[in-house]
Image (cartoon, helix red, strand yellow):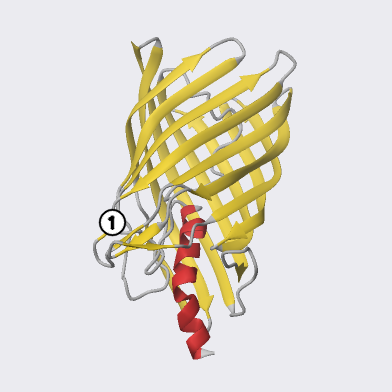
């Protein structure tokens, strides 16, 4: 069993990205994952940046998995358990100024993460600050039935990291993520929303490891009924280039697809969202489920 455990440490770390990223707090020591974005975070009205003003958004999310998959999506024969919970505060400012007909804004996300995992006979618990995200230029356009937003998120390596651990709260590398989000909603309240992202990563100097690039997308299809909205929400993640260790390519590209029910309630200028996303496909990462509760308020 000991040799088996050692052989999956790298895969567990790769998996960590998918899970912990999922919580805005990636991880790793061997294969480190291709994105620090918490896949599935956005959904309802993803392209609709709010009008000029200050806003606070709170994301509470929990990811649970007891299965680690290989390159073919088959379960690795080793004991594996992961529970990761994140409390993420996001501040958004939309200015009254326009650039190219779009409102200019900015945001910052600050995650606090609790990580509890077992890989083989190794177990660990950690709690702390994750990797902070900044975006100083968000541009948003609005029409009668559509909304579009674009920007470039920068993920800072602020989270706790120790290369001797299989999983970490912090990634120990920078992430650069161009994005575009769009929402189309009919006069009858039928909504289709998506947020498309492409991730570039710097090298983790502690491990001489560079995670590959990735395309990923959050999506929601929903119907608005008065103050309520109900639908299906999820994400698609696809690593597009190989990782590199000491300049040598590593073939462990991650993939995942998740879907599940979502509901939103609007009241007094605020919104409360709840959703659950089950991973139907997972390669080179854990496979599990993710629950979200999101709160939006102006101030």
Depth check: give the residue in front, 61 or 147: 147
Name the residue rendered at 59%, 53% in the picture: 256
Circle 1 SS class: strand
Compared with 80, 272 (above or below) is: above
Pick out the residue farthest to the left: 205
Name the residue rendered at 72%, 20% in the picture: 189
Name the residue rendered at 61%, 58% in the picture: 282
Image coords of residue 8 (percent x, y): 50, 76
Image coords of residue 35 (percent x, y): 43, 50
In the picture of the structure, the residue carrying the numbered disc 1 is: 203
Pick out the residue farthest to the front: 248
Depth check: give the residue in front, 135 or 239: 239
Compared with 200, 80 (above or below) is: below
Image coords of residue 141 (percent x, y): 47, 16
User: Picture quarter containing residue 125?
Assistant: bottom left
User: Picture quarter containing residue 184?
Assistant: top right
- Looking at the image, residue 213 sits to the left or right of residue 85; the answer is left
Q: Which quadrant of the figure contains the N terminus? A: bottom right
**Total marks drawn?**
1
Q: Residues within 10 Å of mark 1 (few under 14, many from 20)?
A: some
Compared with 266, 273 (above or below) is: below
């Amino acid at each position: 069993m000991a040799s088996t455990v050692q052989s999956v440490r790298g895969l567990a770390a790769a998996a960590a990205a998918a899970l912990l990223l999922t919580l805005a707090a990636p991880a790793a020591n061997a294969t480190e994952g291709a994105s620090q974005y918490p896949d599935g975070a956005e959904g309802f009205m993803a392209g609709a940046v709010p009008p000029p003003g200050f806003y606070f958004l709170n994301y509470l999310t929990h990811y649970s998995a007891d299965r680690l998959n290989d390159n073919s999506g088959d379960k690795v024969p080793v004991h594996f358990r992961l529970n990761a919970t994140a409390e993420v505060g996001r501040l958004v400012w939309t200015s009254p100024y326009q650039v190219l007909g779009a409102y200019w804004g900015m945001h910052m996300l600050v995650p606090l993460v609790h990580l509890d995992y077992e890989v083989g006979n190794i177990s660990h618990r950690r709690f702390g600050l994750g990797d902070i995200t900044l975006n100083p230029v968000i541009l948003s356009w609005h029409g009668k039935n559509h909304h579009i937003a674009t920007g470039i998120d920068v993920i800072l390596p602020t989270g706790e990291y120790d290369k001797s651990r299989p999983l970490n709260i912090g990634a120990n590398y920078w992430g650069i993520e161009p994005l575009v989000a769009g929402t189309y909603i009919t006069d009858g309240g039928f909504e289709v929303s998506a947020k498309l992202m492409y991730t570039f990563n710097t090298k983790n100097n502690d491990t001489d490891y560079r995670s590959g690039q990735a395309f990923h997308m959050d999506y929601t299809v929903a119907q608005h009924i008065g103050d309520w909205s109900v639908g299906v929400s999820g994400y698609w993640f696809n690593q597009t280039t190989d990782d590199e260790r000491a300049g040598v390519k590593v073939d462990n590209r991650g993939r995942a697809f998740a879907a599940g029910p979502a509901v939103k309630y609007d009241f007094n200028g605020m919104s409360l969202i709840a959703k659950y996303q089950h991973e139907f496909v997972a390669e080179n990462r854990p496979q599990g489920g993710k629950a979200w509760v999101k709160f939006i308020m102006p101030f």
